[in-house]
Image (cartoon, grey):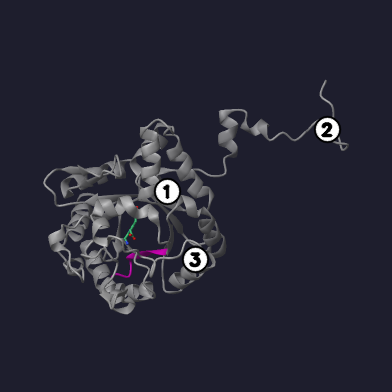
């Protein structure tokens, strides 16, 4: 052997971490984290528009789907083993108002979509946001009183919104509004109406983020919001202790699952939440993250292997699952192996 010992303690390293990395089989054997289709929730936009699907400029590859197209695509997701989808309604401007009244119409787009998908694919889980932003003319998640999103009044509306969504067949209510105290009152409302089985996945830690813009584009709420922002209710991205308080409260109020959002710049938060609470914890790889990766892949600046890499990163950081616009693509890749 020509190599010289490089420490005084013994021979040239006996411990070589590269041994396990040498071959595909041993890499697989020692892998700590495995991503499967069962880890994915697919967020989809639904529209009453005339075409079957409309492109979203800032989210290439994602579309606004009509209900029949949504049913077809949900079938694909189910066949790929994706356990749940999240449905977001694109509400026409004529139906938006200051108070977001359309959110409480049991025949609104999201309720019709939920009922139709449930009928066609009873085995897949359906998640709906509790928040008013798809329905408000100003694009905020609640009602505005004296220039401020009024907490308690908004929560009352969210309870009613959650109930009509549950009545339509929604399986998971996901309050995404960041009002204080909403999880507990939504739980009470659902329980009192006989929907004790409906789960709550709270957007417990939701930051006021620039990464949501393509989503707001998809919904048409970006122009409504204009130069306004959501910093008086969504969290300051400078904070992480506060994130733990948010999760503790939502769990105490009865949340079954919690979420951290956005995803990739917030993996530290995900890890802290999982370590501290050890409850079902989800990450949302949001529209801006999707747009960044898609945009770079489309230009050939990144290889599309980054899709699985980014999703595996969430699991490694402690996520039990990920909401991602890549869900179908990722599940197809995982299936292909
Ligand atoms: C609505 C809501 C938003 C997202 C999910 N639910 C946007 C917002 O709060 O402004 C963002 C999702 C994404 O960017 O992919 N409250």
Residue at image x 64%, y 33%? 20
**Secondary structure category for the residue under label 3:** helix
Query: Could you tell which of marks 1 and 2 lies nearer the N-terminus?
Result: 2
**Which sits in the foreground, 159 or 76?**
159
Range covered by the magenta-colored residues = 193-204
Q: Which residue is mark 3?
A: 243
Task: Classify mark 2: helix, strand or loop.
Answer: loop
In this rendered view, identify the residue nearer to me: 21 or 242. Answer: 242
Depth check, mark 1 against mark 2: the one in front is 2
Mark 2 burial class by Cα count in 10 Å: few <14, some 14-19, many 20+: few
**In the orientation shown, which residue stands out farthest toward the top?**
2
The label on residue 6 is: 2
Determine crowd level at label 3: few under 14, some 14-19, many 20+ residues with C-alpha closer than 10 A: many
Q: Quadrant of the N terminus?
A: top right
Which of these two is toward me, 76 or 271?
271
Residue 122 visible from this viewpoint: no
Q: Which residue is mark 1?
A: 39
How crowded pointer 1 is (Cα within 10 Å; few <14, some 14-19, many 20+) is rated as: many
**Residues under labels 3 and 2: Cα distance?**
46 Å
First in residue order: circle 3 vs circle 1:
1
Residue sitting farthest toward the front = 227
Viewer-nearest of discs 3 and 1: 3
Question: Does label 3 or label 2 sit earlier along the sequence?
Answer: 2
Label 3, ligand 1: CB separation under 8 Å: no
Q: What residue appears at the point 30 percent right and 44 percent down from the top-left corner?
A: 59
């Amino acid at each position: 052997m020509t190599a010289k010992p490089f420490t005084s303690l013994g021979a040239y390293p006996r411990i070589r971490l590269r041994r396990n990395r040498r071959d595909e089989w041993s890499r697989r054997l020692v892998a700590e984290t495995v991503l499967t289709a069962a880890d994915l929730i697919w967020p989809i936009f639904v529209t009453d528009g005339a075409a079957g699907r409309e492109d979203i400029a800032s989210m290439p590859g994602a579309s606004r789907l009509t209900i029949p197209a949504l049913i077809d695509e949900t079938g694909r997701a189910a066949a790929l083993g994706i356990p749940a989808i999240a449905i977001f309604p694109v509400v026409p401007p004529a139906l938006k108002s200051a108070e977001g009244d359309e959110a409480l119409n049991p025949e609104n787009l999201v309720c019709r979509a939920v009922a139709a998908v449930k009928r066609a694919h009873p085995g897949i889980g359906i998640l709906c946001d509790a928040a008013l932003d798809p329905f408000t003319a100003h694009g905020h998640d609640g009602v505005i009183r004296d220039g401020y999103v009024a907490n308690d009044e908004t929560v009352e509306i969210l309870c009613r919104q959650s109930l009509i969504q549950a009545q339509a067949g929604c399986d998971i209510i996901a309050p995404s509004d960041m009002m204080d105290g909403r999880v507990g009152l939504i739980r009470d409302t659902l329980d009192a109406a006989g929907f004790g089985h409906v789960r709550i996945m709270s957007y417990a830690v939701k930051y006021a983020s620039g990464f949501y813009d393509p989503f707001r584009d998809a919904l048409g709420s970006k122009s409504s919001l204009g130069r306004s922002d959501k910093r008086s209710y969504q969290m300051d991205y400078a904070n992480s202790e506060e994130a733990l308080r948010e999760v503790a409260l939502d769990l105490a109020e009865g949340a079954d699952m919690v979420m951290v959002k956005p995803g990739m710049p917030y993996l530290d938060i995900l890890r802290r939440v999982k370590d501290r609470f050890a409850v079902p914890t989800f990450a949302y790889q949001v529209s801006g993250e999707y747009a960044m990766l898609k945009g770079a892949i489309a230009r050939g600046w990144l290889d599309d292997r980054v899709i699985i890499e980014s999703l595996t990163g969430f699991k490694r950081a402690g996520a039990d699952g990920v909401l991602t616009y890549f869900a179908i693509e990722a599940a197809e890749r995982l299936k292909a192996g």
